[in-house]
């Protein structure tokens, strides 16, 4: 029986893993400048958390969650997203952060959604997310979006586009829904069965439909912003003005609602034209009701998540992948027992000097050792053969120029290696 990775998942091989790691580190460095602290939560949670947070009638909860009973008969779900877990942890443990005007957290890891796999869409994918909890100020929306752009910019991704909208609040959402139902009412019979369901249960979700035929019906939809209450409208105008002030390019997308129910007021996506249908590299927005819905005091918040799989696809397309450092510096060959012992001592010194080395475990022959060194793309080989042991010498071979010299001490060898 030959096993392969489950459909919709993939192995991140060493080069890709290194690109992921370096990209994550770079982005965490940027988030640190904005005062975000890392928070790591479990990969699975009680199913109820996501049902409540993401919304019972969203595609994620209705169709995409990996939910199972554990051996204690508890309903468990592999996290489809990170916001719900961060809010759960904030309420469960972080009372000291609750005193702050704003508490900022970042998280990274795999998320799981049972979606139809396609380019840029996986069943296990990776997100780097941020959540800023505690402030209603539109400046928080602006700061967080600036951070998203700053982060992408730091990687060289300059041509991404921000699409932005406001989905209103408890006051104006019913008006928006009514407006939408009125518009869709006459064509509802032509929409897909999912949309017909959404029309009854959660009309805003209609706009999320991935069915291209349905999407064409939504083109002439009345703009949501016309139905916003004064507070939401003022908030939205202020966010747009401040984006202008900060020279951030955006487009207002009046049909942008996002696939999760917790959003209020601002929602946004950062899209790359280099990706196909799945072009959102980052998505997020404000969620002022979620903390209260999960049992806390009413506390406003804003956040986003970057889809790392898609971001790395963009980096690859732009040839902007960070250098991966997988090659080694020195391949160390010692054939006889005495040489082996000596080589191990030399390797200890090399590693203490931050030089990356690998040992020739096969111990067949020096020429085979050199071949192995080349396979590892080593810059140098250290060779201790019979002659070197007898003369108490260390031979260092430059594997690019093929020149070699013998030295009396490891200190001399170190000098050459360090250049
Ligand atoms: P989301 O839009 O569902 O938002 O996901 C954020 C990003 O994750 C997407 O823009 C995309 O890049 C990536 N992504 C989503 N699904 C997949 C998939 N199946 N395969 C590959 N990449 C994917 C959230 O998850 C919210 N929790 C974001 C947020 C944080 N809102 C407020 N705070």
Image (spheres, rainbow, N blue to C red):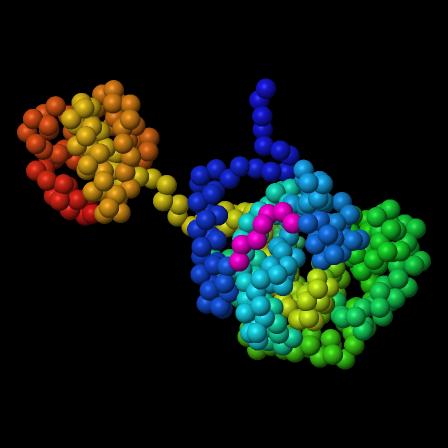
Q: Is residue 43 magenta?
A: yes
Left or right: where does residue 187 sit relative to residue 233? right
> Which residues, given as a range, are shown in magenta?
39-45
Q: Quadrant of the rendered structure where residue 122 is?
A: top right
Residue name at image x 36 percent, y 44 percent: 325
Q: State which quadrant residue 186 falls in.
A: bottom right
Q: Is residue 179 left or right of residue 86?
A: right
Q: Residue at x 71, y 79 (%)?
A: 234
Whether 210 is among the magenta residues is: no
**Quarter of the rendering occupied by the N terminus:** top right
Q: Is residue 369 above or below residue 52?
A: above
* Horizontal and vertical percent position of residue 76: 68, 45
User: Residue 253's quadrant in the figure?
Assistant: bottom right
How many discs mark residues in the rendered view? Answer: 0
* Above or below, 232 relative to 381: below
Q: Residue at x 14, y 41 (%)?
A: 410
Q: Nearer the viewer, residue 411 or 406?
A: 411
- Examine the rendering and report whether any part of residue 408 can be seen: yes
Residue placed most toward the observer, 378 or 84: 84
356 lies left or right of 203 = left
Residue 178 placement (x, y as % from top left): 88, 66
| Position in image of residue 198 (x %, y %) | 84, 54
Q: Image height check: is 231 above or below 334?
A: below
**In x, y percent, where is residue 134?**
61, 72
Instruction: Inspect this view and state whether residue 116 appears.
Output: no
Q: Residue at x 57, y 57 (%)?
A: 129
Q: What is the residue that sits farthest to the left in this orientation?
A: 391
Secondary structure, magenta segment, majority class:
loop
């Amino acid at each position: 029986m030959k096993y392969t990775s489950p459909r919709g998942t993939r192995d991140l091989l060493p080069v890709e893993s290194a690109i992921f790691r370096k990209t994550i580190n770079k982005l965490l460095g940027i988030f640190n400048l904005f005062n975000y602290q890392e928070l790591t939560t479990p990969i699975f949670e009680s199913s109820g958390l996501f049902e409540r947070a993401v919304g019972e009638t969203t595609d994620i909860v209705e169709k995409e969650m990996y939910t199972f009973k554990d051996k204690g008969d508890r309903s468990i779900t592999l996290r489809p997203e990170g916001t719900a877990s961060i809010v759960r942890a904030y309420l469960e443990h972080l009372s000291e952060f609750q005193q702050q005007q704003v508490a900022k957290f970042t998280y990274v890891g795999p998320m799981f959604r049972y979606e139809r796999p396609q380019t840029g869409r996986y069943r296990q994918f990776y997100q780097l997310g941020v959540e800023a909890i505690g402030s209603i100020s539109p400046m928080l929306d602006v700061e967080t979006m600036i951070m998203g752009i700053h982060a992408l910019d730091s990687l060289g991704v300059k041509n991404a586009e921000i699409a932005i909208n406001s989905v209103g609040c408890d006051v104006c959402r019913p008006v928006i829904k009514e407006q939408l139902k009125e518009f869709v009412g006459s064509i509802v019979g032509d929409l897909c069965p999912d949309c017909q369901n959404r029309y009854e249960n959660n009309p805003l979700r209609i706009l999320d439909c991935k069915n291209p035929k349905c999407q064409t019906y939504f083109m002439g939809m009345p703009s949501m912003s016309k139905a916003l209450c004064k507070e939401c409208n003022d908030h939205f105008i202020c966010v747009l003005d401040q984006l202008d002030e900060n020279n951030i390019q955006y487009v207002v997308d009046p049909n942008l609602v996002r696939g999760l129910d917790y959003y209020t007021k601002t929602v946004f996506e950062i899209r790359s034209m280099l990706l196909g249908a799945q072009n959102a590299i980052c998505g997020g927005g404000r969620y002022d009701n979620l903390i209260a819905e999960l049992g806390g005091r009413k506390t406003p918040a804003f956040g986003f998540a970057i889809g790392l799989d898609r971001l790395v696809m963009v980096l690859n397309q732009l040839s902007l992948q960070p250098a991966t450092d997988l090659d080694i510096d020195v391949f160390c060959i010692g054939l006889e027992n005495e040489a082996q012992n000596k080589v191990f001592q030399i390797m200890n010194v090399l590693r203490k000097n931050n030089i990356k080395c690998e040992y020739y475990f096969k111990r067949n022959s020096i020429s085979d050792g050199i071949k192995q060194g080349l396979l590892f793309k080593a810059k140098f080989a250290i060779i201790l053969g019979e002659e070197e042991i007898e003369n108490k010498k260390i031979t260092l071979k430059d594997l690019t120029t093929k020149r070699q010299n013998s030295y009396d001490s490891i200190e001399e060898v170190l000098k050459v290696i360090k250049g």
